[in-house]
Image: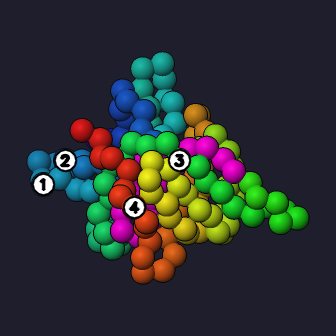
Amino acid sequence: MENASRSGLGLTTAKEFELGQILFVGRNDAELVKAVVRYCIPESASGWQVGLKVIENDRRRADRAATEGACQISWTGDGGNRVVASGKVENVSEFGAQVRSHDVVPVGEAVRVGGEGSAWVGTIRYCVQRRDGYLLGVYFFGDAQTTGPAPRARL
């Protein structure tokens, strides 16, 4: 570990991590701390400079389940036209899902995400560009967020 504060850690690693990825890091022979990746930039040919924010109280209301399943994201575009993008559900919880797509979906847009016998209706909370496309955060509407089973869990 290179530097640490009460709320953050900076370190150099041989591995690249994705923004938003949750990590458990040991600090000075103490117990593990939960942290989220805030940045990851190449430092040299063999390393990455990683900035972590320590998560003291996880604000999530429900645990995420890693999933694996193709999906379609649809919403009403300009002029009332239906727009459809393909994607892959990365994880899902009672209140939302994380979806990877090659298409930009506007933040705040009401969407339907469906695939493999499941469908959700929600709103886009974030759309972050990655090397292989975009990572979308979908917050489900209402009490009954899902219809059908959740996509199959990774084994």
Q: Please report contact status of discs 3 and 2: CB closer than 8 Å, yes or no.
A: no
Q: Mostly what secondary structure, the magenta segment?
A: strand
Which mark is first along the chain, 2 or 3?
2
Q: Quickly name the residue at label 2.
A: 26
Classify the position of the C terminus by image quarter: top left
Question: Badge 3 local density, few (<14 within 10 Å), some, or many (20+)?
Answer: many
Question: Badge 4 local density, few (<14 within 10 Å), some, or many (20+)?
Answer: few
Amino acid type, mark 4: Gly
Amino acid type, mark 3: Cys
Q: Nearer the viewer, mark 4 or mark 1?
A: 4
Which residue sits at x=59%, y=68%?
A: 123
Alpha carbon distance from label 4 to label 2: 40 Å
- Helix or strand or loop: what does disc 4 sit on? loop
Q: Is residue 48 above or below residue 44?
A: below
Q: Quickly name the residue at label 4.
A: 148
Q: Position of residue 100 (x, y in %)?
A: 53, 45
Question: Badge 1 local density, few (<14 within 10 Å), some, or many (20+)?
Answer: few
Q: Quickly name the residue at label 1.
A: 31
Q: Is residue 131 above or below residue 86?
A: above
Figure coloring: rainbow
Amino acid type, mark 2: Gly
Amino acid type, mark 1: Glu
Which mark is first along the chain, 1 or 2?
2
Q: Could you say which is closer to the camera, residue 22 or residue 10?
A: 22
